[in-house]
Every structure is written in C-alpha cells, then in structure tokens.
Image: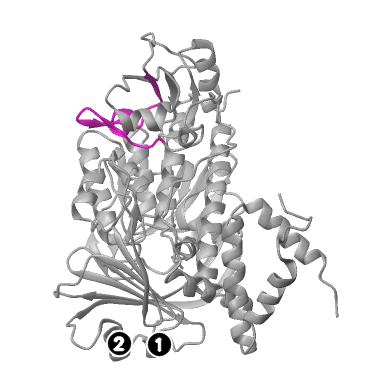
Amino acid sequence: MLEMKPNFNRPDETYAMLIKAHEGLSEDESHAMNARLILILMNQIGDHETIRKALDLAAAVNRKS
Amino acid sequence: MNKPVAERYPLAFRLYPYAQSPDQSAQAPVRHPVIVVGGGPVGLATGLDLGTRGIPVLVLDDQEGAGLGSRAICFAKRTLEICDRLGAGAAMLEKGVQWNIGKVFHDDRLLYEFNLLPEDGHAYPAFINLQQPLFEKFLHEAIVRAQAVGAPIEIRGFNRVDAVERHDDHVALDVMTPDGPYRLEADWLVACDGAKSPLRNKLGLGFDGRVFEDNFLIADVKMKADFPTERWFWFEPHFKSGDSALLHKQPDDIWRIDFQLGWNIDRQKELQPENIRARVSAMLGPDVEYELDWCSIYTFQCRRMEKFRHGPVLFAGDSAHQVSPFGARGANSGIQDADNLAWKLAMVIKGLAPEALLDTYDQERVYGADQNIANSTRATDFITPKSAMSKLFRNAVLDLAETVPFARTIVNSGRLSLPCTYDGSPLNGPDCQGLPFRTRPGSPCPDAPVGKDWLLRLIGGDLTLLAIDTDMPEGFAAHGISPKQLRLSSQSNPALCERYLGEAKSAVYLIRPDQHVAARFDRFDADAIAAALARVLAKD
C-alpha cells in the first residue's frame, strides 16, 4: 500500500538533507547518487506492488516544464 | 538439381555414418509413424524418448555426428534428470564439471563472490558444465543401448531433407543422400533442425522476435595450470573486451571464455589467433600458459515461432525458439520440449489420447519459451544496458553490490535455468489445500531420496500415482491406462515430507510421464483420479 498522506517526522529537515547531499556534485555524480538512493529505498519498501504504484504516481504527475 | 550431401562442418564424433536403407530403393515412398529431423541434443532426446516408449522413430541428419566445438556447455538439473530417465544421465554426471563458487567483477574490482549451496536430497546437482558434443555422444550411446534391447530407433546420417510437403494427416519428404534422392512419408514430423531451421523456412513459417546487435567471441582454452573451478563474470572488464566476459570450466582442462565484442566488429580480424590470444592473455594475466582449443564468433536473437504445432509438424528446440546465451536456456529448454512432446506423441500414436493432447505441447512449451525469453532478455538488458538511464541504474547496482548484500540479488549475469511450472495448463487437475506450493499441479517433481534409490527414478517415464502416508488399492485403471503405483512413507524422509506433504498428513499425486504433477489429493479417490487422468490425456 503506497502511503499518500504525510509520513515524514521531520519533513523540512529531511528535504534539506536530500538537497545538501547533492551539493558539490557534478550532474553525473548527482544522477549516480540518485540512482543508488532509489535502489536503496526500493529495497527498503520491498513490495513489488507498492513500488509499481509509486512508479505509476511518479509517471502520472510528470509535466512538461 | 540439388547439391550433393557433403560435410558442412568438422565432426567431434562420427556417431551415425551413412548407410544405405532399403527405403531408398522402395517402389513407393515408405511411411514412418514419426520422423525426427535433426540429430542434435533435442532430436536425439526426442528419438530416444519415443523409441523407449515403443514408438518406431526415424531420425534424419544431414551430417554424420556431433559437430566440433563446445557450444552449449551448461546442463541444468532438470535436463540431467530427463537424461537419467533416458539412460544417459549418469555418464554426463561422471564426465561433467560441477562448481559452486562464482565471482563477479566490475572493471578490475572483485565485487563479491557467492556459493550456490545446492539443496540436499537430489540425485543430480543444480547443473554441470559439459561440452555439447559429449552431451550428444552420451545420448547416442544411450540410443545404441536402447536399440540393443529392442527400442525401434533408427538414425540415418547424410540424409538431408530438401523438400517437405505438408498434408492434413502426414508429410512427404524429399531426402538427399550420397546415393541420390529418395522420398519418405511420415504421420508425424518433429523438426529439431536448429535456429536456422530449413524445415521452418521450407514451410514458410515465421520466426519473429527481438534482435540483439551483439557479437560474442568464444575462446576455449586448454590450461594445465591450477586454476580454480569457479565461474568468473566481468561487467565492463578492465581488459577492454566489450560489455562483459565470462570464464567457465569444462571437462578435460578446457576453459570457456566468452567475450562480448559489440556490434561493429571485423569478424575475420577478431578470429585471428594472435588477436584472440591478446584478449585471453589480458584476461588471464601474463604468466598463465594456455593453448587455444576452439574459437567461434556468434550473434543471437530472442524470438520464437507463434505456434510450435502445425498439423502433423511439431517444432522443438532452437527451431521453435531462440534465446540469448545468458542463463543456459537454449539446449536446456530444448530437452524440456522433447520431454514434454514424446509422451504426448506416444499416447496419440497408441490411440490412448486424442490429437488435442498435442495442442497442449504447443501451449505448455510456448509458455515455457516465453519465460525463457523474458529471463534471458532481462539478463541481456542488465549486461548490455540499452539506454543511458538503464546503464546508470545498472552501474548503481554494481557499485552497491560491493558492500550492500541486497544489491547482489538484482545483479543479473544470467539466472540459473530452472524448469518451467505449467501454471494454468489445461492438463492440470485439482489441487489440494495445505500441500507445498513447489509441487502444485504443473510443476516438475522435485527429486527426493527413497531408501537407496531416488523418487524420480522410481517414477521413470510412466504415468504414476504416488501415495504418501495413505492407502491406495491395487489395480486401479481408467481410460485404458493402469498408472504405475508408488506407496511411500514420509517417516524419516524429511526431503519427501517437505517437498510433497508440507503440513498435510497424507497425499496422493497423479504424475505425468514427463514427471510433472498433474493433480493432487489428500487421499485416494477413484472417481476424482479417473477424472484427472482423463484431463491429462486431453479427453475431457
């Protein structure tokens, strides 16, 4: 089951931590780190159907900028 | 005028030299119940299986034996079990190389190593490495032994099929020999003539799928040095040999090395011994002594025919489906085709089952082929990512795999070839709650020790009723068949208990002649078993 309601216990700090982790990285390094992070979080979730819903959601809100 | 029959490639073993047959001087074309075209692993297994079931079978091959070159080298447990049933498994196991340790490298780094830790309680290991010509030779030796005790199998070397006419109830063949052409007819034709299948082309049948633009260089090298019996796989190897490389041991001090070369290569140049030696030396290191034994460059595709049965013509093995080499699913799946087809064809020829049973060969093996194609395509896409993003994730997986165990589960250099479970097959009868998932209807029976023997050997190639910890009356028969009966106790047999009973107190399994579970019950019920038997024979 994909969590749609807020689930962070420290949302602003967690988000800031994500941005800070990319500071000083080249674009290639950032992409590589994001890929590792996605894999680590996917394993944390584990459940195939939940990950499918997360992918569907991420694809659905894709807007042309 | 058709060209004369000639040697197309050098042979490793001359197994069935040409000899003139009375059919060649017959007034009218001689009709055979079954003709198998192709004397490779799948054709030999099909001929042997049919012959041991008492069906007269003629195998035609345009050469006289097993071609030189290792080619398919990984033979999986299920293949060995099938070959054991056919009388060839023990010789394969004795000659084959077993290994459990694998190492995975990226560039020049060892990422991790693994131990396969095979499950106990099986007569055969997860797989062995064995050169294809030896595999064919052992099957042929089993055919010779079967012939000696009356199995009606005939193999004709240097018999090339030049034309095929398909009729509703038979086929007619124009066959070329060193003594000129002759005609043959067959009620059933099994096409085991390989990925380029001339029969498929002559019948105008399609073979669609995905082309992978890649070339592989196989170098078999002979090393006397003390090199460990392990499988080594490189992603993006530091010795600059394309996207991947693989080192694998075969019998007789031969090592298989696969180099993935990419698409735009100069074949002639890559095949020159000095260029091959440059690659091999870069891989093994400067101090390792070796000789080149056999080299080849090949490409591959992932594709299959839409249907494997076309009236009286049945396609099996590479002629019906082709996969990438990752995961050893070519020859292994072809042997499963033979295993699935032979008993069905025998039942139909003996009048025990309607032709509809052969449509289930198509259904079940198309399902199996799709699984194999999906598996080998996934491995190929992991090894050779097709987009920048795919490569980014692949390398992220490899970077994590060095330190984080979870990432190793998605590193894919080819998955172990496992037999297909025919979930949803029309031959599957009822299941029974509480029995183990792995032995559900459609699944291949896992082996288990029974005293000093093995369960699969006791089942053999017969339709079998297996009763565990429950009574079963003798002499049960239905639909013209008396299944073999096995009565076993799970007491002090933990493997049998775990694989066939689970939490249940007792079970009765109806097992097909290819050792797949057809139906299962908690106890013997004659009416229910007769109904399941009708279903196995496609009679309901």
Q: Please give left or right for residue A24 compared with residue B372 in the image.
A: right
State which quadrant residue B219 falls in. Answer: bottom left
Residue situated in front as seen by the camera: B395 or B260: B395
Q: Position of residue B342 (x, y in %)?
A: 42, 38
- Asked whether B355 falls inside the magenta stretch, the response is no
Residue situated in front as seen by the camera: B107 or B301: B107
Q: Is the residue under label 2 in contact with that under label 1 (CB below 8 Å)?
A: yes
| Residue B18 makes an appearance in the image | no
* Quarter of the C terminus of chain B within the rendering: top right
Q: Which mark is residue B282?
A: 2
Q: Position of residue B82 (x, y in %)?
A: 34, 42
Query: Residue visible at 44% across and 65% down?
Result: B325
Whether B457 is drawn above or below B194: the answer is above
Q: Please give left or right for residue B485 compared with residue B375 in the image.
A: left
Q: Which mark is residue B467?
A: none
Give amino acid for label 2. Answer: Ala
Indicate which disc, 1 or 2, sits on the residue closer to the N terminus: 1
**Disc 2, SS:** helix
Query: Residue visible at 37% across and 79% down?
Result: B109
Give amino acid for label 1. Answer: Lys
Whether A22 is drawn above or below B127: the answer is below
| Residue B321 makes an appearance in the image | yes
Highlighted magenta segment, given as a residue range: B445-468
Q: Residues within 10 Å of mark 2 (few under 14, many from 20)?
A: some
Q: Pointer 1: what residue?
A: B240
